[in-house]
Image (spheres, rainbow, N blue to C red):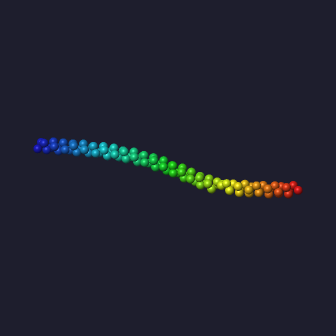
Amino acid sequence: MSDNPKLLLVTLGAKIRELMRRHEELKERAEAMQMHIAEQSEELSALRKELEEMNIKYQNLKTAKGLAFGDSDVREARNRFNKLVREIDKCISLLNE
């Protein structure tokens, strides 16, 4: 009977060591998961910032394209401008008479 308590004590010690080992493994795993979550969070923030910048560039491009003139638009604008200048010249000459 004296071996029985010793055996129980040895078994209890082994189980406690196993629990401590598992606890350390889980603690390390939790730390690794926290680091992974932090990395993913940083990556998500960077991607959101990049998306925001791309949206701004896209809006700027749309605006620039809307304001851009093609060759025919430039010619038409130049012709209209020249026509207005000729009309102004005519008006000035009529005022000088």
Q: Position of 28 compared to 61: left or right?
A: left
Residue lying at 45% horizontally and 47% vertically, measured from the top left:
43
Q: Classify the position of the N terminus by image quarter.
A: top left
The residue depicted at 40 percent of the width and 48 percent of the height is: 37
Residue 69, image quadrant: bottom right
Can you give x and y, in whole percent of width and height, for residue 60 in the image? Answer: 59, 52
Could you say which is closer to the camera, residue 68 or residue 8?
Answer: 68
- Residue 87, image x, y percentages: 80, 57
The one of 93 and 7 positioned closer to us in this rendering = 93
Q: Nearer the viewer, residue 84 or 18?
A: 84
- Vertical side of 58 occupied by 17: above or below: above
Quadrant of residue 2 in the image? top left
Say left or right for 33 vs 42: left
User: Residue sitting at 25 percent across and 44 percent down?
Assistant: 18
Quadrant showing the C terminus: bottom right
Residue lying at 74% horizontally and 56% vertically, measured from the top left: 79
**Which x, y percent locates residue 34?**
38, 46
x%, y% of residue 9? 18, 43
Spot the residue most to the right: 97
Q: Is residue 75 left or right of residue 43?
A: right
Give the total of numbered labels: 0
Q: Quick one: 6 or 28, which is closer to the camera?
A: 28
> Does residue 12 lie above or below 59 as drawn?
above
Q: Can you name the residue that lies furthest to the left here?
A: 1
Residue 72 as seen in the image, left or right of residue 33: right
